[in-house]
Image (cartoon, rainbow, N blue to C red):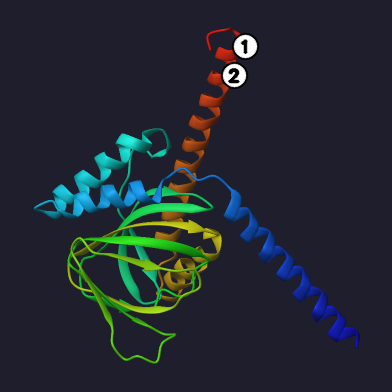
Amino acid sequence: MTLFSSKLRYLLVFYAAFQAIQYGLRWKSYDISPKQFKTVAGKAAGAATISQSMSSLTSGLRTYYEPILPRHIEWHAMQMGGLSLRIYPYLTAFTEFAAAFSAPFPTTGRPGFHWANTTCTVLKGKVSRFNDGTQDESSETFSSGMVFRHGQFESFVYNLEKDTYVACYGRGFLPFSSTVHVTSGISLGEPLSIIKFYITQAQNYWITLSQSMYQVFQHYKARATGEL
């Protein structure tokens, strides 16, 4: 009886925490507009070459979100449930992210469950996927310019063709999603790439936070001095 009560108590605590996080995700404000991101990504997908697509995506996002984007962005290695990818992170926060992903070679894998809703635009190449939760044996295929959505706690097997590039924006409880990245990298013997990625993101997050705090300070300073 004591063991049952203990397990029940943990389940109730877990459920309460889950509901609290869901409530917070539903009502918090976000920095990036999904509609705006999709528009920028769609325009980038229409470029003639992938270098032009990435340039268009970067300049388009900086046009709207320059204050919150890192000054310097670089590609990082990323393992996600068998998918060997590269990530170009524009924004990585606790509750939202914006990034481009590329597959230098054909790759197949299941990136796992994610506590996030993500929308992706294929910039170049082709993405195929199979939904684990359906009895249908047919797969979905998305080519350049097409958009697909990976919903919260959905599971798919993905296949990315060689030289495929995808731009994605998502909202959710991203620390939960990072466990897939971390465990996948460690299982393949790549702990240093994981450490490098998260150190870089921590530095970018601190820079972005500092800029936001400085803007708030300047705003209230201007109000106090009568400039607003």
Q: Residues within 10 Å of mark 2 (few under 14, many from 20)?
A: few
User: Marks 2 and 1, Cα distance to the nearest angstrom?
Assistant: 6 Å
- Is residue 220 toward the left or the right of residue 144 in the image? right
Tally of numbered tags: 2
Q: Secondary structure at mark 2?
A: helix
Q: Amino acid at mark 2?
A: Tyr
Q: Identify the residue at the far top of this view.
A: 226
Q: Quadrant of residue 102?
A: bottom left
Please report the residue visible at 54 percent of the width from the left and 44 percent of the height from the top.
29
Rendered residue at 28%/49% (across/down): 39
- Judge whether 12 appears above or below 226 on screen: below
Vertical order, 5 against 101 (above or below): below
Report whether 100 appears left or right of 182.
left
- Check contact, mark 2 vs mark 1: CB within 8 A: yes
Check disc 1 and give the amino acid type.
Answer: Ala
Q: Indicate the quadrant where residue 100 lies.
A: bottom left
Residue situated furthest left in the rendering: 48
Residue 84 position in % (x across, y down): 31, 70
Q: Quadrant of the N terminus?
A: bottom right
At mark 1, the secondary structure is helix
Query: How far across and how far down the image is residue 45, in percent?
Result: 19, 55
> Most extreme residue toward the right, as rendered?
1
Q: Nearer the viewer, residue 104 or 188?
A: 104
Query: In the rendered view, would you say 116 is above or below 50?
Result: below
Q: Which residue is mark 2?
A: 220
Q: Where does label 1 land, which residue?
A: 224
Locate residue 113, reporting x and y percent: 49, 74
User: Which residue appears at 37% of the width and 37% of the height?
Assistant: 65
| Residue 163 or residue 189, whichever sits in front | 163
